[in-house]
Amino acid sequence: MPSNLDRQQQPAWLVWAALLVIYLVWGSTYLAIRVAVATMPPLLTAGVRFFVAGLIILAIVGLRRGLTGLRVTRTELVGAGIVGAGLVAGGNGLVMLAERDVPSALAALIIASVPLWVVVLRTATGQRVARGALAGVLIGFVGVAVLVLPAGLSGAGHALGLFLLVAAAASWASGSFLSQRLRLPADLLLSTALQMTTGGLLVAIVGLLVGEGTKFDVAAFAPESLVAVAYLLVFGSLLAFTAYSWLLQNAPISQVATYAYVNPVVAVILGWAILAEEITPVMLAGAVLIVASVAVVVRHEAASRSGSSREASSLPTAAQAEGA
């Protein structure tokens, strides 16, 4: 991994250009998902998208490093599969299901609580967590409650969809938590590719088991839904991943981690501007609480890990960092 000195030598404009890519692209994935699931089966769509993206990354690794660069142990493959199940199948798959009924902006705000769930898991397993981070977690979950309870009770959002989003956030956090405890391929590209392919295959199988295969009618897919899926594949899974991987090696962890609280803000603005989604006072209150709490948690976590040899691995891989 490059040293801190190496990172400081990178042009500031290049770092900010890469940050802008993950801010805008990953912030826009919630809107793209909302458009995609309007006419496409959510689980099969998620499965195909991640499976294909994973295969493309595997091909890139193979072309760059040869077949030896694709070698993994059985333990590493199992580890990647478990993490992929939490991130892609449980995380993204549930978001795809939920956004059939829940606005993209609301989905993005609830999913923004993922770092809070990670802190909960760390605390539950006996790890020491800074008091400031714990305070941030409490504030953030108050924000989640502000969004979920009024929306579910008033009918502004379907209760099942809101529950699926909370479950998706917990699943994403579990995948992130386990990624630090299971043996995974050391190569970031290879590890993420295996997480995408295994997770994508799993969520596609689930989609077939629940009967989505019988509803897979290409003629019924709206052109805008197909464009949205292509955007998620090319920009969300490939372009933004490349920018994110480069940032992990060339920018301070505290700067890279800002995507965690910028992405939901971008998602809310895009949902309002493009899909005419309503931004209510309740949503604004919940957004402020969640985004502020995530900022506090991320800063405390980055500070506690600065100087660590595992600094880069304290952030999610693209399969989980990508809000959807």
Image (cartoon, rainbow, N blue to C red):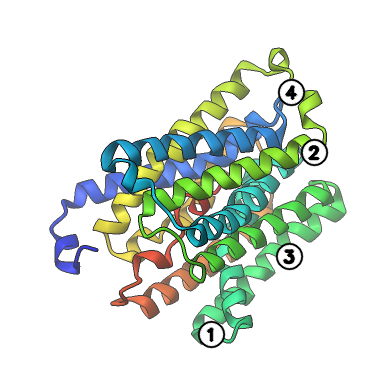
Q: Is residue 278 visible?
A: no
Cα separation, mark 1 vs mark 2, equals: 38 Å
Question: Which three-letter amino acid code belongs to the residue tagged 3?
Answer: Ala
User: What's the distance in space between the residues labelled 3 and 2, CA to CA?
Assistant: 32 Å
Q: Earlier in the sequence, mark 3 or mark 1?
A: 1
Q: Residue at x 67, y 55 (%)?
A: 168
Q: Position of residue 103 (x, y in %)?
A: 69, 41
Q: Residues within 10 Å of mark 4 (few under 14, many from 20)?
A: some
The three-letter code of the residue at mark 2 reads: Leu
Question: Label 2 vs label 4: CA separation?
Answer: 13 Å
Residue that mark 2 sits on: 209
Work out how far the residue at label 4 is from the one at label 3, CA to CA, in angstroms: 36 Å
The circle drawn on residue 145 is: 3
Label 1 is placed on what type of residue?
Answer: Gln
- The numbered mark, 4 or 3, whose residue comes first in the sequence reads 3
Q: Which residue is mark 4?
A: 216
Circle nearer the viewer, 3 or 2: 2
Q: Is residue 25 above or below residue 296?
A: above
Q: Nearer the viewer, mark 1 or mark 2?
A: 2
Kind of residue sitting beneath label 4? Phe
Give the residue at x 52% y 66%: 294
Question: Earlier along the polypeptide chain: callout 3 or callout 2?
Answer: 3
Q: Position of residue 316 (x, y in %)?
A: 46, 59
User: What residue did someone put label 1 on?
Assistant: 127
Calculate the distance from the C-alpha at mark 3 to the C-alpha at mark 1: 26 Å
Q: Are marks 3 and 1 in contact (CB under 8 Å)?
A: no
Is 203 on the left-hand or right-hand side of 115? right
Q: What distance separates the C-alpha of mark 4 from that of mark 1?
A: 46 Å
- Give the quarter of the image for residue 111: bottom right
User: On screen, 218 above or below 3?
Assistant: above
